[in-house]
Amino acid sequence: MDLLLSGGPVLVVILLLSLYALYLFFTRLFKLAKERPDSDRLMARVNAAVLGRNLEMAMIACDHHGGPVARVLKAALARIPYGRPAVEAAFQEAYLSEEQHLTRGLRPLATIAQVATLLGLLGTVTGMITAFAEISQQGTGNPSALAGGIGQALITTAAGLFVAIPAVLGHSYLVSRVEGILVELERRREELMGNVAQAVALKGRESARAGADRTGAVKTEATQADTFEPT
């Protein structure tokens, strides 16, 4: 209690910010821990379904797996019948939505790190103002009169740094987790589009082969008809 009183109202604000920073960090940490960044098994099932032109099976695999990669892939898969531009647009829209969802709470945490440092500086300034006010009233012959202002300056500076440093470290850690997920999304996007292009090419070759077979069958029937035509 004496520490709070000596730090003044600035120290109270810094402590409140520290509690909010802890809340933001652990809330986002637990949220990110629940997301499933592993997608190798999911992509194996999705790729097999896409190459087999079974979109329903691919979307079911996304539903069962869950996580940001699965949600983005499902949004893109739903637009495959409408062509590559529609798939690209759906993927980009879902990607931006996931990015906003994953980064929620990170900017306030970074802001707290900056504001805590500034509040510590503010406490230093107000403490020195208090100290000089005491000097102007009592002179320099009484060092104990300066202790209150100088103590406030040192305590608030230390408290600001004590809050800012862990906040910066926590923010950097969470950002690295989010960036890892976003990189995985981009990698899976390229993989999905490659498999879609491969499936379309296979379908085109099958259609061409079927057309050639039908043409050959018609020619064969015509030849047989000419051969057995009565003279």
Image (spheres, grey):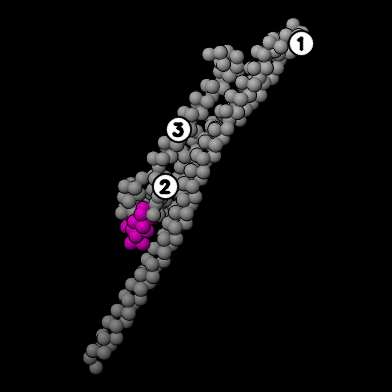
Q: Of the residues under marks 1 and 2, which one precedes in the sequence?
A: 2
Q: Is residue 75 visible?
A: no
Q: Which residue is at 50% across, 26% downward?
A: 20
Q: Total marks drawn? A: 3
97 in the magenta segment: no
Q: Is residue 125 visible?
A: yes
What residue is pinned by disc 3? 26
Amino acid type, callout 3: Phe
Amino acid type, callout 1: Thr
Q: Tell me: residue 203, above or below residue 225.
A: above
User: Mark 1 and 2 residues: CB-CB less than 8 Å, in contact?
Assistant: no
Q: Quadrant of residue 44?
A: bottom left
Tag 2 secondary structure:
loop
SS majority, magenta = helix
Residue 90 point in image, percent of width and height:
45, 48
Q: Quadrant of residue 84?
A: bottom left
What residue is pinned by disc 1? 140
Residue 134 point in image, percent of width and height:
72, 9
Q: Which of these two is toward me, 121 or 179?
A: 121
Q: Which of these two is toward me, 230 or 61?
A: 61
- Left or right of 67 in this view: 168: right
What residue is pinned by disc 2? 37
- Look at the image and give the residue range highlighted in magenta: 41-55
User: Mark 3 and 2 residues: CB-CB less than 8 Å, in contact?
Assistant: no
